[in-house]
Structure formats: C-alpha cells, structure tokens
Amino acid sequence: QVQLVESGGGMVQAGVSLKLSCAASGLTFSSYAAAWFRQAPGKEREIVAALSRSGGITYYTDSVKGRFTISRDNAKNTAYLQMNSLKPEDTAVYYCAARGSITYRDYVGPPNALDYWGKGTLVTVSS
C-alpha cells in the first residue's frame, strides 16, 4: 500500500522559514517525480515545485522562485520543501505527490491519474 506522509507544517510569522518533509512507502520512490502542491481556502490545488526522479531537473511556480527549494533523498524515500521568507499568501495546505508521469510537461502539470498523494500539512503564515 502506497503511503505518503507530510510533516513540518505549522503556524509561523511572515519572514521565517519552514521545512516540509514527505516520507514515502510502498513504492519505489526513485521511479517517481516528486512534487509539492498547495491549496488555499477557496482556491484550486496548484503545483508549487517539482523535481525529476534523479533530482536533476526542478520546477518552481513563479511566486516561490528564489524562496523555496525542493529536494529529495531517494535512499530515504523522502522529499523535502525548504520554504524561506514565508509570506501570508503562502498560507495553504501543502500536499506531497509522487508523480508517475515521466515527461517534464506532465509532472509539472495539474494532478493526474498517475499521482499518489499525501493527506497534507497545514502552513499558516501570519503578518
């Protein structure tokens, strides 16, 4: 059974940092692209960052470029999202995804049937 478990969320003030972790089990994690999505209240789930299977190719949505860093440790079946200089608009539930799509266009795109998901971790940033 595939499981992805996020951790590291919390309530923080603007300007500080948080690091999210995503522990995967039940799948060969290195065979999947890793991605972080977020969903704010009343908004659609959006991709924040993605990382290729080997870790050599990254994608960031414009609003987090220069502030967030996605990484992975395939030996530990874990993905990370380092979030610096947090802003109130970063407030959302953050979801980890193991993406079975092998093309860049697909694994940086919207959710699809080849994704496995965690249950999310809440990040609240106050001003």
Image (cartoon, rainbow, N blue to C red):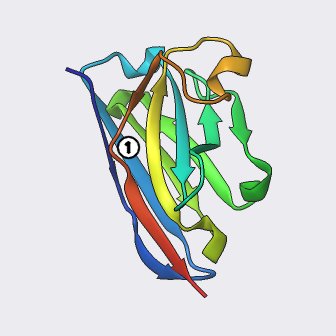
Quadrant location, the N terminus: top left
Residue type at mark 1: give it: Cys
Q: Residue at the far right: name it.
A: 62
Q: Is residue 96 left or right of residue 69?
A: left
Q: Is residue 15 above or below residue 71?
A: below
What residue is disc 1 on?
22
Do we see residue 111 in this rendering? yes
Q: Position of residue 16 (x, y in %)?
A: 57, 79
Q: Nearer the viewer, residue 36 or 119?
A: 119
Within the image, what quadrant is residue 46 found in?
A: top right
Q: Residue at the far bottom: name it.
A: 127
Do we see residue 85 in this rendering? no
Q: Position of residue 54 (x, y in %)?
A: 57, 22
- What is the crowding at mark 1: few (fewer than 14 residues within 10 Å), some, or many (at least 20)? many
Q: Position of residue 40 (x, y in %)?
A: 55, 59
Q: Position of residue 27 (x, y in %)?
A: 31, 18
Within the image, what quadrant is residue 105 found in?
A: top right
